[in-house]
Amino acid sequence: MPALLPLMSAGDLMKPPVIYGHFNKHRGFGIEDYYPEVLQFITILRDPFETAISTYFYIRKVSHTWKDQSRVQTEDLENYLRTSSLNILNHFPREINLDNFKDIIEEFFVEIGITENLPHSLEKISRKLGKGFDPATLETVNATERDQRVPNDYRDQFRDKHPLEHSVYDFAKARIAIT
């Protein structure tokens, strides 16, 4: 569990802190568990389908070194996509559903970036935080090669299985493109 930090002291009123990390409310360390008073958030999302595909190939690549082999998928890609769950929205500070996600995003998020357009997303986030950003500092790390082709129809099936995640991603993607 991350250490709880004091958010506001008299010296921080003009320069409030930025807390960052992978908070996850469904694993017992959500942002509201630590900082219920926080009302502004920033996140970066990745296409849910690409996240699942990437996870599949990554686990296949590195799982032979894991002590706990029970987490290693043994099925093929199609079955993995059919049975896998996503945890993208576990990191959101509020519970969202298809009826409220737009309102939650509009009310609480300063910005939501998109991995597929990371330089533009980080430039927007930096501007909103009053910070500079140099896109030359970005590098690609942890990219796992794909040793098989991913059929296009898998995307549609996956989208149908995860409508909330895709709706949130599509909304965020449209927002980042507008400004």
Image (tube, rainbow, N blue to C red):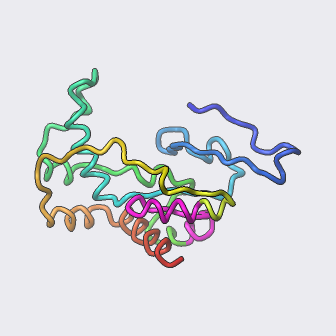
**Residue at the image position 62 percent from the left and 64 percent from the top:** 110
Q: Position of residue 68 (x, y in %)?
A: 28, 24
Q: Position of residue 115 (x, y in %)?
A: 41, 58
The number of numbered badges drawn on the structure is 0
Say left or right for 116 vs 2.
Answer: left
The reply to whether the magenta stretch includes residue 10 is no
Q: Residue furthest right?
A: 10
Q: Residue furthest bottom?
A: 178
Say left or right for 101 vs 164.
Answer: right
**Residue at the image position 69 percent from the left and 53 percent from the top:** 38
* Residue 54 vertical position relative to residue 4 in the rendered view, above or below: below
The reply to whether the magenta stretch includes residue 114 is yes
**Residue at the image position 84 percent from the left and 43 percent from the top:** 9
Q: Which residue is at the front of the view, 84 or 152?
A: 152
Instruction: Characterize the magenta stretch by its predominant secondary structure.
Output: helix
Q: Residue furthest top?
A: 67
Question: Looking at the rendering, in which quadrant would you find the C terminus?
Answer: bottom right
**Residue at the image position 33 percent from the left and 41 percent from the top:** 142
Q: Where is residue 149 in the image (x, y as percent from the top left)?
A: 11, 55
Question: Looking at the rendering, in which quadrant would you find the N terminus?
Answer: top right
Q: Which residue is at the front of the view, 42 or 126?
A: 126
Q: In which quarter of the image is residue 34?
A: top right
Q: Where is residue 91 in the image (x, y as percent from the top left)?
A: 49, 50
Q: Residue furthest front?
A: 136
- Provide the residue span drawn in magenta: 103-125
